Image (spheres, rainbow, N blue to C red):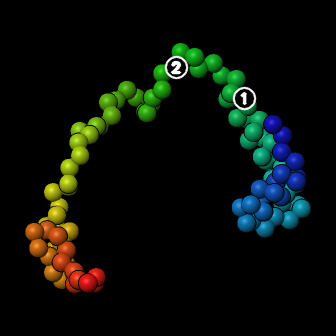
Amino acid sequence: MSVDIDTVKRVAHLARIAVDDADAQRMTGELNAILGFVEQLDEVDVAGVEPMTSVIPMEMKKRADAVTDGDKAADVVANAPASEDNFFVVPKVVE
């Protein structure tokens, strides 16, 4: 993939970045170099490589996937002007 000056200016416009012609010309070369490196990485054979989260083997910390109320109901209503049985008490607005 190759980037031209029009593409650089369009992306700059979408990002709301002011880019003059000299900067657009410079960025064209830089972006093409970056995309060339990404294309090089795409050529690497990773067929037998397992996905990993770290460069050293380690077990991810996991928590139990259980639905709870958080056991914080009293804390939630602690600063409420009025509460009853861990519910907010509000004035009646509909007759």
Q: In the figure, is residue 7 to the left or right of 93? A: right
In the rendered image, the residue lying farthest to the front is 95
The quadrant in which the C terminus is found is: bottom left
Q: In the figure, is residue 63 to the left or right of 17? A: left
Image vertical order of residue 9 relative to residue 91, above or below: above
Give residue 49's mark: 2
Q: In the image, what residue occupies the spot 63% across and 18% down? A: 45
Q: Position of residue 55 (x, y in %)?
A: 45, 30
Q: In the image, what residue occupies the spot 53% across and 15% down? A: 48
| Disc 2 secondary structure class | loop
Q: Earlier in the sequence, mark 2 or mark 1?
A: 1
Q: Is residue 79 visible?
A: no
Q: Position of residue 32 (x, y in %)?
A: 80, 42
Q: Label 1: how many residues lie within 10 Å, few (<14), some (14-19) or many (20+)?
A: few
Give residue 40's mark: 1
In the rendered image, the residue lying farthest to the left is 85
Q: In the figure, is residue 71 to the left or right of 41? A: left
**Rendered image quadrant of residue 82:** bottom left
Q: Position of residue 28 (x, y in %)?
A: 83, 49
**Rendered image quadrant of residue 19:** bottom right
Image vertical order of residue 11 relative to residue 76, above or below: above
Task: Residue type at mark 2: give it.
Answer: Val
Task: Residue type at mark 1: give it.
Answer: Gln
Q: In the image, what residue occupies the spot 81% across and 37% down? A: 1
Q: Label 2: how many residues lie within 10 Å, few (<14), some (14-19) or many (20+)?
A: few
Q: In the image, what residue occupies the spot 23% across and 83% down? A: 92
